[in-house]
Image (cartoon, rainbow, N blue to C red):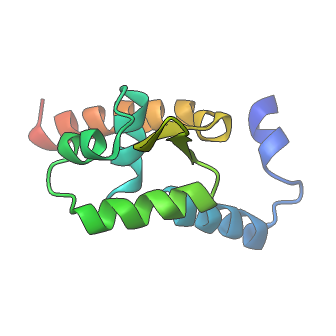
């Protein structure tokens, strides 16, 4: 087992702890919309309508609900402009950026998987 893996996994292995950690991660970033929302925000879409337009199929109600949940989980920050009360922007937090590598790896894996199932 390499050093990085040893730092994450306990010795002896604690399966219950590992499963709980996986479930926590899936709870926070799982579902159909959270990763596309994070991707949209990280691609420069800050306003609600910009985010909504960048994600095909998401409804206004679902985006609103997901953004509120993501804010509670410290993944996005809702910023209101005091000079323009109707101007609200959403930004990814440093905490959200901490799993950027995971997202990139998921994109890489997804592309490879798509090639594999297409037989290329």
Q: Is residue 100 visible?
A: yes
Quadrant in which residue 31 is drawn: bottom left
Q: Toward the viewer: 36 or 9? A: 36
Compared to residue 81, the image places residue 61 above or below, namely below
Q: Position of residue 56 (x, y in %)?
A: 15, 49
Q: What residue is drawn where x is 21% and y is 63%?
A: 59
Q: Position of residue 60 (x, y in %)?
A: 25, 62
Residue 38 relative to residue 77: left or right: left
Q: Toward the viewer: 41 or 115? A: 41
Residue found farthest to the right:
11
The quadrant of the rendering that contains the C terminus is: top left
Residue 76 relative to residue 31: left or right: right
Residue 16 relative to residue 66: left or right: right
The quadrant of the rendering that contains the N terminus is: top right
Q: Position of residue 65 (x, y in %)?
A: 40, 67
Q: What residue is drawn where x is 77% and y is 32%?
A: 4
Residue 13 relative to residue 31: left or right: right
Q: Toward the viewer: 114 or 95? A: 95
Q: What residue is drawn where x is 69% and y is 69%?
A: 20
Residue found farthest to the bottom:
16
Residue found farthest to the front:
83
**Label tally:** 0
Q: Toward the viewer: 10 or 31? A: 31
Quadrant in which residue 54 is drawn: top left
Quadrant in which residue 39 is drawn: top left
Q: Is residue 2 visible?
A: no
Compared to residue 45, the image places residue 36 above or below, namely below
Compared to residue 91, the image places residue 48 above or below, namely below
Q: What residue is drawn where x is 41% and y is 54%?
A: 34
Q: Position of residue 118 (x, y in %)?
A: 10, 39
């Amino acid at each position: 087992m390499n050093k990085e893996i040893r730092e994450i996994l306990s010795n002896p292995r604690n399966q219950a702890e590992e499963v709980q950690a996986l479930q926590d991660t899936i709870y926070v970033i799982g579902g159909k919309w959270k990763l596309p929302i994070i991707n949209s925000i990280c691609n420069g879409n800050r306003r609600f309508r910009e985010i909504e337009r960048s994600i095909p199929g998401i409804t206004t109600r679902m985006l609103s609900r997901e953004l509120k949940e993501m804010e509670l989980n410290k993944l996005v920050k809702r910023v209101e402009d005091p000079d323009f009360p109707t101007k609200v922007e959403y930004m990814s937090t440093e905490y959200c950026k901490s799993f950027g590598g995971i997202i990139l790896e998921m994109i890489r894996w997804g592309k490879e998987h798509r090639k594999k199932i297409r037989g290329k």
